[in-house]
Image (spheres, rainbow, N blue to C red):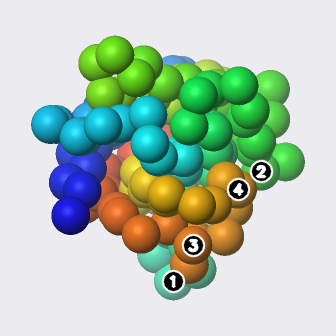
Amino acid sequence: QVQLVESGGGLVQAGGSLTLSCAAPGRTFSNYNMGWFRQAPGKEREFVAAISWGGGSTSYVNSVKGRFTISRDNTNNTVRLQMNSLRPEDTAVYYCAASTHHYGGSFREYEYWGQGTQVTVSS
């Protein structure tokens, strides 16, 4: 079992920035491809960004390209999502996820999930 702990959510005005962090204490973090997903009220869970186990590959949903950046630090067992130029439509609960075999946007292929952190963007 891999425990993922997210932090960094909050309330921000449109145009502002937030950085989400996801930690996996005590695990060999570099074994996992990592992803960020989000879910807004009444909507399905949506892929946001993914990063391969070594950090050499990243992918993003089109709506966040150029605004969000995913990165990882395998030495400190953390993955981050830097979010700039936030919009009200980015409001959602953001989830960190880990997969031993999948890199990309299929949420069903991620085996481990954090509890989620709320991001609210006011207009």
Q: Which amino acid does label 3 sit on?
A: Glu
Q: Which amino acid does label 2 sit on?
A: Val
Residue linked to disc 2:
61
Per the model, the C-alpha gap separating discs 1 and 2 is: 19 Å
Look at the image and tell me whether residue 51 can be seen: yes
Mark closer to the observer (4, 1): 4
Looking at the image, is mark 3 or mark 4 earlier in the sequence? Answer: 4
Element under label 1?
A: loop
Residue under the point 62% across and 26% down:
55
Looking at the image, is mark 4 or mark 1 earlier in the sequence? Answer: 1
Look at the image and tell me whether residue 87 can be seen: no
Per the model, the C-alpha gap separating discs 3 and 4 is: 9 Å
Q: What residue type is labelled 1?
A: Gly
Mark closer to the observer (1, 3): 3
Across and down, in percent, residue 18 comes to 44, 25
Residue linked to disc 3:
109
Element under label 4?
A: loop
Looking at the image, is mark 1 or mark 3 earlier in the sequence? Answer: 1
Across and down, in percent, residue 29 comes to 36, 36
Residue linked to disc 4:
104
The reply to whether callout 3 and callout 4 are in contact (CB within 8 Å) is yes
Element under label 3?
A: helix
The reply to whether callout 2 and callout 4 are in contact (CB within 8 Å) is no
Per the model, the C-alpha gap separating discs 3 and 2 is: 17 Å
Task: Judge from the rendering whether residue 80 lies leftward or rightward of residue 66; answer left or right.
Answer: left
